[in-house]
Image: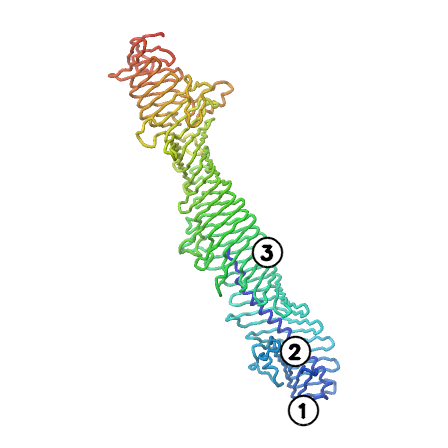
Amino acid sequence: MRTSVERLRIGLLVGAGLLVLVIAAFLGYARYRVGKVIADLPGKLGATVTKEFNGYTYSQSDGKRTIFTIHAAKAMQHSDGKLTLHDVSMILYGHSGDRADRISGDDFEYDTKAQVVTAIGVVHLDLDASAPTGDPNSDARKHLSGPAQSGHDDATLGGHVIHVKTSGLVYTKQTGVATTDQGLEFAFGGYTGHAVGAVYNSSTGQVVLQSAITLSGVDKGRPISLRASHGELDRTARRADFRDARYSSAGQVAQADMAQIHLREDNSVERIDCMNNVALEDGVQGKVNSQRAEISLSATNRLKAAVLTGGVRFDQQRPERQAQGESERANLEFDEHGDLSHAVMQGRVKTVEHLRASEANAASPERTLASDALEVWLASAGVGARSQVRDMKATGSVSMLTAGGRSASDAAARKFSGDLLTAHMVPVNGSPEISTVHGSGHTAIEQKGADGIFQKSTGDTLDAIFHQIAGAVGKSSPELASAIQQGGVAIERTVPAKVAGAASDVQHATAQKAAFDAATNHLTLTGDVAMNDPGRQILAAKVVIAQGSGDATADGGVKATYQQAGSAEPAHVLAARAELSRSSGKAVFYGRGPSGAGAARLWQAGTGGQGGSQVEAPVLVFEETGGSDKDKSRKESRLTARAETAGTSGMVHAVLAEGNASKGGGAKPAGQLAKTSGTGVARIVSSEMVYSDSEKRVDFTGGVRMIDGSGEVKALSAVVYLAAATPSSPGASSHAATAGGLLGGKLDRIVANHQIELTQPGRKATGDRLIYTASDQMFVLTGTASAPPRVVDAQQGSTTGAALRFHSGDNNVVISGTDGEAPARKVETETRVKQ
């Protein structure tokens, strides 16, 4: 955040206010001295009066020093008790001889009865403002301590002289009050000022400038002006109050309904209190408003500290940016040069910054910061340069939002939040830009892209690095280069319906660490990673997610769980690595780990957790195509098991439940194929396996070897058909009705093709095609015209025919004249062999 308070020249307001204060003090002092001198004059006229050309000169001393000297061209004593002096000039000396003030005017009248002194016409007061004690080079002493003379010559005044010009001055000796309702003009060190009406009370030392106070001049080459509707000086309390004060210089403005100036003993300004409608404005840096401002100054009249309270607000308007901010309180500290070095804002702190739209910045980026408290450190950029923000610390429900991008299509919103956020700024082309952000305590990163995809991640700590877009300083927000969250990281990603294609897709993930890299637009999760999509969970040591597409790769102890519609039991996968594509609906699991060996494994428990199916292969591929989230019945689920290198045989191992499995035949842990007992399961080895969920069909190719409790079958390919499980008991009906899903349901039949070799205890058969039906455990073996099916029995010899039918539980063989796929139309021979 960039603040503008430090750039406002409050110091000039202080100097100008002090100047008016000094003028008022000397004006009152001079009136008091004039009144006293003239009031005592009648009794002194007979003492040491020397008449020269119808004039006189009178001096008074205390025996050690001259108190004052007065010269008048003419004096007249009236019969009514009034005394008139014409063309008067007086020199009044300080107690230590360090000051000499001159008062001159055309006519003064003293009413001895009423004890009232009235200046008739214009009065000039030349007051020594700042002569050090005993300084012989004082401008005031050189120009004012010479021989008394009539008239007034501004050209002879030095730089330490305050000149005041007024009229209608009235002093009442009984009340000790000097007043004028006329205008005052004053000048000092290149400054000129005006006021209307003045009151000085010699008893209390209070001086009042009634109205229309103005001051103007040049300070270090900069024009300045000060205005106030009313001013009061309490010399005893060392305080001056100005009402409706307004200071301006070269576009800088400071104003308040009331300004109180507190002085030290040496009359330097110690503190300024501004109350009600305080406004500090800079044409470049902006405007700050509050209800109260307490400003402390150093002994060298430089800003030391400031406290703004009562709804602090600032506003900045530039061609390239617009910024607003607010807080309940702001504490400011300044360095030895008077430049802002430290600021603390408290109470509902909020800042908003808009970067105006342009050809290079069509999206009009916005930055927002909100917190309970904000602390800012600034660094000097050199003499004459504005201080620059270097570090910030926000505490208490902190949120920092950036929105927009380099173009309208690139518009995005990103929000950082936490219990505490710190930011480091770096100068970029003379402007501070955010470089790093650190957060702790309930940190969160929220991002919404132009496509509507929303992602939120939370964690214990946050570290982010930004970089400025080349050639775009002041035109766009710094871009996030990288971000790291650690400690209980949780991520939620919502893909809207317009992107997902149907209903919104919500994804969840947890990890110990999340690292984002803008160069690759990838999010890397490590440490007990768990990803949860609708119907799927992925566990791994490491997951890398492509932020744009949502595609991911998982490494290290990958475990996936699929819960499909219509299935009571989930399917589980163990692998070393996985590639997950959201756009294609494909998930590829690899079994090879760092050692270069291994297999991915899938298993699913059957009905009631009994007799599940299993698959092992170097590569397992899950695909889901067609349909929609609203119409899941049209979706096609597909599982492919294969070797990493095409043509590698015997790499796929599958265990399929035959339906009437024994209660001990449930799915085994990862890496351990089921050991069969009886006819509960079938073990199949092949080069590739493809499963279609809509057809409940499993295709095995590349050389197939099938083993069950009754024997072994070899073939070039085989197709396994699955059927929905049936209830095993009335109490299990509801559970069995939902059995299914990936490789769910019982084994219905197997069709093996080409180069069939069947081996059972005491029996071996060959043929071109074999059909096995699980419901009756019947085998039907057929061949070709040139190579009919053949069964060789150890006791009965060999048997051939168009089709051979036999059970796995006995030695009976039925020879038919057909291939066995339909009921036999004609039986040529039949032989029954009993063991």
For label 1, the residue is: 51
Please determine whether, in this image, residue 155 is positioned above or below residue 549: below
Res. 313 mark:
none
Q: Is mark 3 on a helix, strand or loop?
A: strand
Q: What element carries label 1?
A: strand
Return the disc, 3 or 1, that comes first in the chain's sequence.
Answer: 1
List the single residue furthest toward the right.
Answer: 113
Q: Nearer the viewer, residue 810 or 492?
A: 810
Q: Which of 569 and 109 is in front in this view?
A: 569
Determine if residue 608 is in view: yes
Residue 361 percent coordinates (x, y): 42, 54
Circle 1 crowding by C-alpha within 10 Å: few under 14, some 14–19, many from 20 = few
Return the disc, 2 or 3, that comes first in the chain's sequence.
Answer: 2
Closer to the camera: disc 2 or disc 3? 2
Q: Quadrant of the C terminus?
A: top left
Q: Is mark 2 on a helix, strand or loop?
A: loop
Q: Is residue 434 left or right of residue 185?
A: left
Amino acid on which the number 1 mark rests in the picture? Lys
For label 3, the residue is: 329
Closer to the camera: disc 2 or disc 1? 2
Circle 2 crowding by C-alpha within 10 Å: few under 14, some 14–19, many from 20 = few
The Cα–Cα distance between marks 2 and 1, rounded to whole angstroms, is 30 Å
Amino acid on which the number 3 mark rests in the picture? Arg
Please determine whether, in this image, residue 234 is positioned above or below residue 781: below
Q: Residue at x 51, y 55 (%)?
A: 391
Residue 35 percent coordinates (x, y): 69, 79
Q: Are marks 2 and 1 in contact (CB under 8 Å)?
A: no
Q: Are marks 2 and 3 in contact (CB under 8 Å)?
A: no
Q: In this view, does 376 lie to the left or right of 61?
A: left
Determine if residue 506 is in view: no
List the single residue furthest toward the left.
Answer: 786
Res. 96 mark:
2
